[in-house]
Amino acid sequence: MSIIIKNIKQLLQIDNESRLLVKGSDMKHIDLIEDAWLLVQGEKIEDFGSMSDFNENDILKNNPDIDIIDAKGKMLMPAFVDSHTHLVYPASREIEYIDKIKGLSYEEIAKRGGGILNTAKKTQQISEDELFESSLKRLNEIASYGTGAVEIKSGYGLTLESELKMLRVIKKLKAASPLTIKSNFLGAHSIPLEYRGRQSEYVDLVVNEMIPKVAEEDLADFIDVFCDIGFFTVEDTERILKAGQNYGLRAKIHANELDYSGGVQVGVKYNALSVDHLEFVGDEEIKTMLNSETIPTVLPGAAFFLGMKYAPAREMIDAGLPLAMASDFNPGSSPSGNMQLILSMACILYKLLPEEAINSTTLNTAYAMGVSDKLGTITKGKLANLIITKEIPTYEYLPYYYGTNKVDTMIIKGRVVDIKN
C-alpha cells in the first residue's frame, strides 16, 4: 500500500541523521518543512520534501494505486511513543481517588492493602479473556490521541500465575493491534501482604520462579523493579536485575518517586535503558546519569494526579541530559494515556519549550522503548507511524490548546487506522 500526503502545512520532527535521541540544548530544536509532502510505501516512510519540488504525476506513474491525502492547513508529525504504561489492568480505582482527596497519602493507601495490591487482587480473579478485552479498549483509546507505540508493564499479578496472565495478554495485544508494543516484566511492583516482613522470600519467588518462566515463554522485552522507599531496596533490585540479565532482559527502573532511594544509581549500574519517575533527583543523580546510556523519564500524569513534587526536568536538560516524558497510564496514580496531555504538562508544569516537549514525547520516548531506530522522527526508512493534525495555526498550538483531541488522522505502519474508541 502507498500513500501520498500533500500540502502539509508543516512537516514536523524531520531527521536526516537517524539520531537515536537528543539531549541538553539540542532538545530545543526540531527541524521542519513548510508546505510539504510525504510518501509512504508499505509500512515505511519512503520520501518527503517541499511542495515546490513535488511532482505528483511522476509519483502517480510509479504508484497507480496510491492513496492521496490532502493535508492543507494541517501538520504532520511522528506519532507519540509512550514508553511507560500499566494499561493492562482489571478495574478502575476511583474510590481510592476519593481517599486521596480526603488526605490519605499514596503510602498510607498502600500500607492498608490498597493501591497496587487492590488491583493485584482483582487481576488474580479476572479471566485472561476479560483482561484482554478491557485492555484492548484502552489501547484503542490511546491510539485515538496519537500514540503509535507503547510499552506495557505487568506488575498487577504478584503471583506467578497472574504475572504470566498479564504478560500473555500483552502478547495477545501485540498480535491484535497495529501499534508497536513492548512488554515489560514488573513482578517486583509491590510486596504482597502475605510476604510483608519476609520480603526477601518474595524476591526469591521473582528470581527463582517468575523470571525463568517468563523467559521460557518469551513473554517480556524488559525487566523492571519499583526501587523506592517502602517497596524494593537497592539490594533487592540488584538481585532481580542480575537474574534478568542472565535471561537477556534489559533493565528499566521505577526510581526516586517517593524519596532518594538509590534507584537511579542502581539503574545506571545495570545499564538500565531508562529510569522513570524521578521526583527526587539531585546533583548526584544527574552526575550518575551523565555519560550513561540510561535516559531519565519523567511521568507528569502521576505527579499531577498524586499532588507530588515535580521532577527537576529543567535542571536535567540544562545539565546536558536527554529527557523522555511518558504517561504512566494506570488505574491508581495516572488514569490517562493521553500523550497530548503529557505534551501540555511538559510545558505548563515542567517549563519545557514546545520543541523540547515534542522531542521528549517522540524520539526520546522511542529511545526509552528501544525503538528509536524505527520510530520517533520523520526519517526515510522508519516506520510510518504518523499523526495528521486537525487544522491548527502553529505547532506551538499542540501543547498550548490542551484538553481537546487535535488528531485528525492516524497512520500506523503505513495504514490509516480508525481512531474512534
Image (cartoon, rainbow, N blue to C red):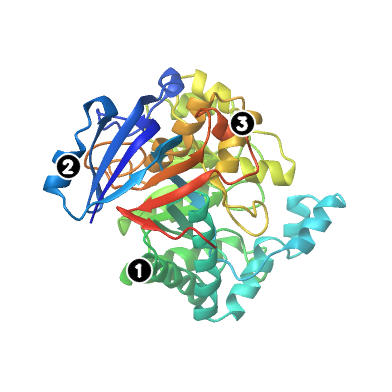
In the rendered image, the vertical position of residue 309 relative to residue 169, given as above or below:
above
Q: Are marks 2 and 1 in contact (CB under 8 Å)?
A: no
Q: CA distance from mark 3 to mark 1?
A: 36 Å
Determine the residue positioned at 40% across, 20% down. 26
For residue 241, say whether it is visible. Answer: yes
Q: Tell me the crowding category of disc 1: few under 14, some 14 to 19, or many 20 or more residues within 10 angstroms, Cα based.
A: few
Q: Amino acid at mark 1?
A: Ala
Determine the residue positioned at 54% across, 23% down. 353
Q: Considering only order in the chain, which callout, 3 or 2, is on the residue closer to the N terminus?
A: 2
In the rendered image, the vertical position of residue 121 relative to residue 325, given as above or below:
below
Q: Where residue 227 appears, x then y in whole percent? A: 56, 48
- Nearer the observer, disc 2 or disc 3? 2
Label 1: state its secondary structure.
helix
Q: Amino acid at mark 2?
A: Ile
Q: Nearer the viewer, residue 156 or 130?
A: 130
Q: Which mark is residue 175?
A: 1
- Residue denoted by label 2: 59
Q: CA distance from mark 2 to mark 1?
A: 33 Å
Q: Nearer the viewer, residue 331 or 245?
A: 331
For residue 236, say whether it is visible. Answer: no
In the rendered image, the vertical position of residue 386 relative to residue 420, given as above or below:
above
Q: Residue furthest right?
A: 102
Q: Tell me the crowding category of disc 3: few under 14, some 14 to 19, or many 20 or more residues within 10 angstroms, Cα based.
A: some
Q: CA distance from mark 2 to mark 3?
A: 37 Å
Q: Are marks 2 and 3 in contact (CB under 8 Å)?
A: no
In the rendered image, the vertical position of residue 377 relative to residue 67, given as above or below:
above
Q: Are marks 3 and 1 in contact (CB under 8 Å)?
A: no
Q: Where residue 296 appears, x then y in whole percent? A: 48, 35
Q: Considering only order in the chain, which callout, 1 or 3, is on the residue closer to the N terminus?
A: 1
- Residue denoted by label 3: 400
